[in-house]
Image (cartoon, rainbow, N blue to C red):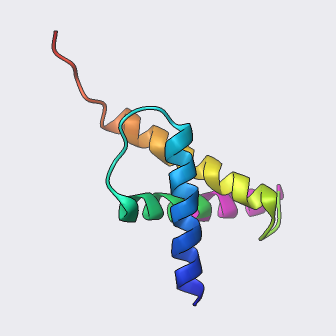
Amino acid sequence: MHWLWVFIVGLVVGVIAKMLMPGKDPGGFIITAILGILGSVISTWLGEKLGLWGETGLVHFLGSIGGAIVLLLIYHLLFKRKTTA
C-alpha cells in the first residue's frame, strides 16, 4: 500500500507543479507522477539534511511541490525548443 500512496501523492504534487509552472511540459500522468515523486524525494532529502523540516507535514508537501517545480525548470532549460522566424 505504501507504493500506491507514493504514486498518488506524487501524481498530485506533479499536477500542482505543472499548473504553477508555465510552458509546455513533458508526458502524461505517469511522467507527472514520476516528476512529483522525484521532486518529493529531492526536497525531503535536502530539507532534512539542512534541518528545515521533518518527515511529514504541510511544509514537507509544499517543499515537494517546490522540488517538482525545480525539476520542471531544469527540464525547460535543458530541452528548450528553438523557434524559427
Q: Residue 22: x percent and y percent?
A: 47, 32
Kindly indicate the quadrant of the structure image that contains residue 23: top left
* Residue at left offset 16%, top offset 15%: 84
Asked if the stretch drawn in magenta spans residue 50, the answer is: yes
- Give the number of marks: 0
Magenta portion: prevailing SS class: helix
- Front residue of this view, candidates 45 and 69: 69
Q: Residue 29: x percent and y percent?
A: 39, 61
* Residue at left offset 30%, top offset 37%: 79
Asked if the stretch drawn in magenta spans residue 70, the answer is: no
Give the magenta-colored segment's residue range: 41-52
Q: Residue 51: x percent and y percent?
A: 83, 58
- Front residue of this view, candidates 75 and 11: 11
Task: Say which quadrant the C terminus sits in.
Answer: top left
Residue reaching furthest to the bottom: 1
Kindly indicate the quadrant of the structure image that contains residue 55: bottom right
